[in-house]
Structure formats: structure tokens, C-alpha cells
Amino acid sequence: MIAKLLKNREILLVVAVVVLLALIALRFPGFVAPSNLARVYNDTSILIILALGQMAVILTRCIDLSMAANLALCGMVAAMLNAAFPGLPIPVIILAAMALGGLLGMINGTLVWKLDIPPIVVTLGTLTIYRGLIFLLTDGKWINAHEMSDTFKALPRLALAGMPVLSWLSLLMIAAMFLVMSRTPLGRAFYAVGGNPHAAIYTGIDVGRTRFFAYCLSGTLAGLSGYLWVSRYAVAYVDIAAGFELDIIAACVIGGISIAGGIGSVAGAVLGALFLGVIKNALPVINISPFAQMAISGTVIIIAVAVNARAERRKGRVILRKAEAV
Amino acid sequence: MVDPLLLQEKTTSRMKPAITLEGISKSFPGVRALSDVSLALYPGSVTALIGENGAGKSTLVKILTGIYQPESGVIRVADTETTFPTALAAARAGVTAIHQETVLFDELSVAENIFLGHAPRNRFGLIDWKNLNADAEALLHRAGADFDPTIRLRDLGIAKKHLVAIARALSVDARVVIMDEPTAALSHKEIHELYALIERLKADGKAILFISHKFDEIFRIADRYTVFRDGAMVGEGLIADASQDDLVRMMVGRAVDSVYPKKDVKIGEPVLTVSGYRHPTEFEDINFELRRGEILGFYGLVGAGRSEFMQSLIGITRPSAGAVKLDGNVLVIRNPAEAIRAGIVYVPEERGRQGAIIGMPIFQNVTLPSLSHTSRTGFLKLANEFALAREYTSRLDLRAASLDQDVGTLSGGNQQKVVIAKWLATKPKVIILDEPTKGIDIGSKAAVHAFMSELAAQGLSVIMVSSEIPEIMGMSDRVIVMREGRIAGRFERSELTAEKLVRAAAGIETQLSGRAA
């Protein structure tokens, strides 16, 4: 029974997170206090939202390296909108950020779909372009806290039923993505396209269009995260979230989402992000240097990939033998 | 009995086979690929290996080149018993293979391809480019080629790539050259150049194994023949002593067992009419009618254009001309989704690559093309999905612990049932089954055949693409034979014989009987 449970990737991850928390609690019991855990969750919320979008893309055998740049551009535009029109309601700004993010995602998706360029090349290009656009928009100037309206900055921190809006938003996104992935034809198509693109074509699924929608989704979530990031840290500049795309991908990989596509779950993406969040928040508390943190994150990623690869290889071998018999 | 070759050959050194296989057996789960097969290849002689698809020719080539290990049997190279545990061991023993699609490296130069793995080195242990190119040029010359060894392989046509492969064989001093349907992709002129090359290799004392489906080639180039059927050797001898009729009889010579569960179904009105279908490179002039309750067999050799035609029928590729009518209405199919909506579904040949989605549970595989039927709100209803999946998998007698199980954990036969269930769940009018029983065990085969019969009895129209003559003869109401992209014959069930099918597929004229015996 236990052995069977341990084969389930998500449960294995829960166990890993719990073990990690227990180890930290040995050195610093305060870390596992409920209030602190809620704080850690809140701190990881943006990573969770982004990992959900990346998950959809990776499931279709693609990758979105431009998410962090997309976030930075949308965050900057949100901040500029707020600075220029302080009276603009915050929901409008959020929708604008999401729409812009979705548009940037559509650009990625269109290039992958219609021009058939490898996704890693497309998003490496757009990553640079989106960052460059921020500089063109601002001449490299910062938008600082005093230029933003108070409501703009306050929304993510606003407490609702004891939890900040930021945490609520990430929970809402988890629920929405869970619904999309498990209860809509689109979610099923993500799995089908990544699991076996050739078979998906025969099944009547348009592989390119499915990937396009995955990029739209990741772009929209990056746009939302742009507002959340800028308002939470109360500053917008060219280099915000620089390099964060790697954390997003790492969260997915740790969460058991196969880079080869077709395998992964919402729970996995969330747990992968939480695992990274716990490490990031706990290691400084127990006096481990940021450089050791990077090494630890890297080690975890490789272990996660090795574990997943083993699980997948066992299945693959049976098929191969069958195929050879033909 | 005296081997006639002994009488022909003048020098005694040529009598010894370059390589012999004795009592080779090999099986795969559920399939006995080769049983107790023997083969001898003689220096300076071309042996044609003949057999239907699935007769075991490819398995034999893989054993000869060290890719598969036989379960029993002996390989002898120049009288020494040996084994080929790896492809490298086979290459070292002088066995080399030239495949239909050459296994060379497009981005490397011709010379690099020839010497890959055994390039001449200079005294620093680095590649000696000067000698490499000079040696390559000499080898190409021996192979009858005159192009520059420094050009990239991708810039050559297939015929010239064959020459590179042959130059590579010469570079390792190959004693045995296996040619697996080398002319499949060649033009008429290129084929004649290949014949000239084979003559040169013969003169060089190479033993050549020539695998081909084309009888004109075999009679043109081969000295000896060996016929395989169902994994066993059923005949061998000198080509000079054989006629085409003899060879065809050996290839197919077996009574079609009456185990096929073909039901007598009243054939109804035409359901699907295809007229004037053509494609720039794959097929042309395809016309036929498919009736309600009918099983229409499509027979042909691999590469005859059957799958390519089916794929264009369901909108994966676009034909350059042609019209389709379904139930009397003109139909335009631009993509597979439209074909499925119209009621034409295609169960592809490559189950692993094109059929099941490994990693997905059984029920999701089954419902994938019918998701719009299982939900009304745009959100999926698991209960409906399970009901649909249960209905069709139980009709196919699927053996699985749970429908929630990953398809990848099922046997090949059960995976095939999942794939077929997936298509039936779309409630089609026409179902196209491409090699429906290829590579699956006998029990699953029987289940698939019984079910096919059942479908026809229920009024579905079935197109069955198959390269297995017993299956074609056992299951079809009518058979269309394709050859080189064209329809080469149409037969009613009552007039079917294995010989007729093979003749039509191989393009043998009935009045011609090859060289008379």
C-alpha cells in the first residue's frame, strides 16, 4: 500500500515537502508555525501562478522561456498606466495586464504554430524582445513606489478572511487550472498533443492550435503575475524577475511535469513551486548562504528529473519491445 | 543431391560459402519470427531473399548485422563458428547492409561517411584529412562513382547515397553485402546503374544478399534464391532453374485456413464513392465504391501508396485532385476532425506512434475524439466518459484491471483494442483499418477479426489495408490491389486466389511466366 502510494508522483512530492519542513523544524521550530507557513505560501503565490502556465506549455512538448520577460513588460505597463491615470480602477489595470500578457503569448504561439520554429528558439527570441521593449518604453527609468497609487500597491496585501488577496488569487488560479486541465477538451488536448503528437493528429486534434492556446494561457498568467509582482514589490524596472523563467521551469520539473510532454498535473506544478518556495524561505533562516541555496535547488532538480525519468523509462521499454516484434 | 553451383563454379575456392546460417530461430512476445532457418551466401554470387511482408526477412537481416541475437542456431563465417553480439562485431566480420533508406549522416561529407569510425589517423592521433579524402575518392571510383568526396551527403540523391554506402562497405573490406530493397526509391536509370555496380561487386568476390519484391529485378540480377514464408525457409535453388510461377507458389503456398470469422452480410447501397483521387507523388487515379456492410480489402506491397491514400482521404494530406461522396453527398475534408465529424475514421498502422497516447488512462484514450458527445456544457463529464469507454472496450473484450489504467501498461493486442474502441466510439459510417493485426498475438488477432465481421454485420463499411494475404483473403468481400500508387487489380471474394493477389501487387503479367523452367 505504502509502496504503491510512493509511486504516485504527487504524494511523493508531498512527502518530500513534509520531510523538508521537518528537517527545517529541527533547526528552527518557528518556521513550521501556521502563520509562517501561510507567509511562505503567500510568498510563493506568483511562482505558483507562473508554474501553472508553464505546465500547460510543457505538457504540449513546448517551453516558454519568455514568461519572466512577459511578466516584466506587463508589470511595467501596469505601473505606467497607474502612474499616468491614477484614477483608473485596479481591476481594469489587471485586465489590461492580462490582455497584454495574453497578446505576447499569442505572438509566441503563432510563431510556434504557423512558422514551425522550435519553441525554445521562439521564446528565447521573444524573451529578449520583450525585455528590450521595456527599455524602449521607459528609457531604462524606474517607476518607484511614490509614483504608484496606494490602492495599486495595497491590493495584493489586502487581507480577506485572514489571507492576503495574493494568496487568494493563486488559489483561484489553481482551481481554475484544475478545472481546465481535468474538465475541458482543451486540457485533454494538452495531454494528447504532448503524449503523442502523431496520434493526436489522427484523432482530429490540431496540434499547432493546441500549442497556441497553451502559450496564450501562459502569457495571460504571466500578465497577471506582472501586476502582482510590481504592486507587491512596489517598483517596476527593466530587470525585474530577471532569470525567474528558470525558477518557473524548475518548479515544473520538480513537480514531475515531463519535459518530453504529456505527463504532469496541476498538483505537481503547485507542489514543485511550493518545494522551491520552502527552500528559498527556509535556507536563509537556518543560515545557509544564497549560493548553497542555488546548489541545493539544482541538486533537487536533477534528483527530480532522475526519479521521473526512471518511472517513464519502465513504461517506454514495454512499448519498444512490442514495436520491434512487428 | 549435388549442388548445381558446384558444377558451375570453376575455382574450388569459390565453392565455400562466405557466410552460413544454420538452424536460426528467433521469436518475439507472441510472434515466432524465424524458426530453424538456414541460409548460405556464396562469394561472387547474388542470392535473392523472397517472401511476403512478415515472412521474417527483416529479422534475418537484423540477425546478420548483429542487431538481434538468435535464440538458437549457428553463424559461420568462412568455416569458423561465430556470434554477432553487436552491430560492430558483424561489421568486423565483414557483413554490411545497405538499406532502403540509407543510414548515413546527412550533415557529414561523403568521405566522412565512408570512414566514420575507422578514419585514417596521422601521427598525433588526429584525423588525417588528406588521406581520408584521397582514400574516399579511390573507393568511390571502385564503386563506380565520380563525385567529389568532400561534398556534404545531403546534397546527393538517393542513388548516389547508395554508392556512398557501397563505398563504405568496400572501405571495411566487406565480404557480405546485404541489400534490403535497394531499388525501392530509385529511378529507372539509377536502377540500371545499381545493376552495374552489383556486377562489379560480384566480380570483386562479394557475397550479396538481395532482398526485393520485384520479380523482374530478381530474375535480372540474382543467381540463387531463397524463399521465406511465415518465418521458415520453404525453398531455395538457382534462379536459372526457377520460374516466376514457382517462386510465387512458394511464397504464398498454403491453404488459407477457414478460421476467419467472416460473416455473410447482405451488402447494401454505396456509402463512400471516391473518384479521381490523385497526389503529386504518392498515388493517382484512385476510383472505387464502398458499400454498406462491406469489408473492402486493400492489398499491396509496402510502399504501394495504400496508407498514403487513406491518409489523404481523412485530410492529413491533401490530394491534388479527386472527389469523395458519402451517402451521396459531396464531401470536402480538410482535416481529420472534419473526417471524424463526417463519419470516416482511420485506425492507423503504427499503433505506438500514431495510435495510443501512452501516459493517458484507457478511458481518456477512448473518448479523445468524441469529447464533444460526452459533454453539453463545454465541461467534460467523467461519468459519461467512463460509460462510453466501458461500452466500447467491453464490446472488444478488452482485458484491463481498470479503465483508469495507463494504456502503456497494456499488451500490444489490448492497446490495439483501445485504439479501435476509440474510433468506434465516434459512431462512424466508414472505418479504415490499416494493418489492424500487425504485430499482435494470435488471440487478439482473432478478437479483432471477429469484431470487424460484427461491425460489417451491423451495417458499418470497413476498409481493411493489409499486407497479409490470409487476412485479406479471409476477411474481404472485395479486394483492391495497389501497386506503385495505382490500382493494379480488383477482385471479388469468389475469384480470389493468393497467386492473383501477388501477381497484381508485384506487377507480373499473367501471360508471362518469367523464364520457363
Image (spheres, helix red, strand yellow):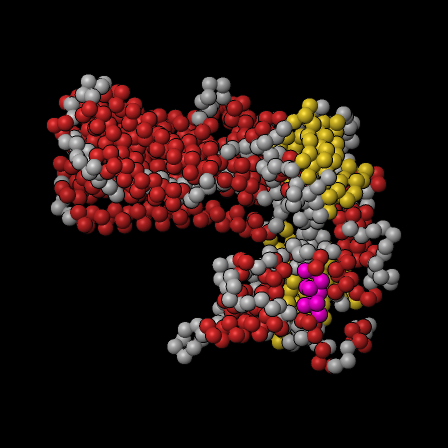
Q: Position of residue A164 (x, y in %)?
A: 20, 25
Q: Residue at x 17, y 35 (%)?
A: A142
Q: Residue at x 87, y 61 (%)?
A: B516
Compared across the picture, whether A19 is left or right of B193 comes to: left
> Toward which corner of the image does residue A214 lie, by quadrant?
top left
Compared across the picture, whether A21 is left or right of B281 comes to: left
Magenta region, main secondary structure: helix
Q: Position of residue A129 (x, y in %)?
A: 31, 40
Query: What span is in magenta?
Result: B190-199
- Of residues A138 and A189, which is closer to you in this image? A138
Does A269 lie within the magenta span?
A: no
Q: How many marks?
A: 0
- Of residues A58 and B393, which is closer to you in this image? A58
> Toward which corner of the image does residue A88 lie, by quadrant?
top left
Residue B188 in view of the camera: yes
Q: Position of residue B216 (x, y in %)?
A: 77, 58
- Of residues A55 and B98, which is closer to you in this image? B98
Q: Is residue A277 above or below residue A157?
A: below
Q: Position of residue B291 (x, y in %)?
A: 74, 29
Compared across the picture, whether B108 is left or right of A237 comes to: right
Quadrant placement of the C terminus of chain B:
bottom right
Residue A221 in view of the camera: no
> Toward which corner of the image does residue B114 lie, by quadrant?
bottom right
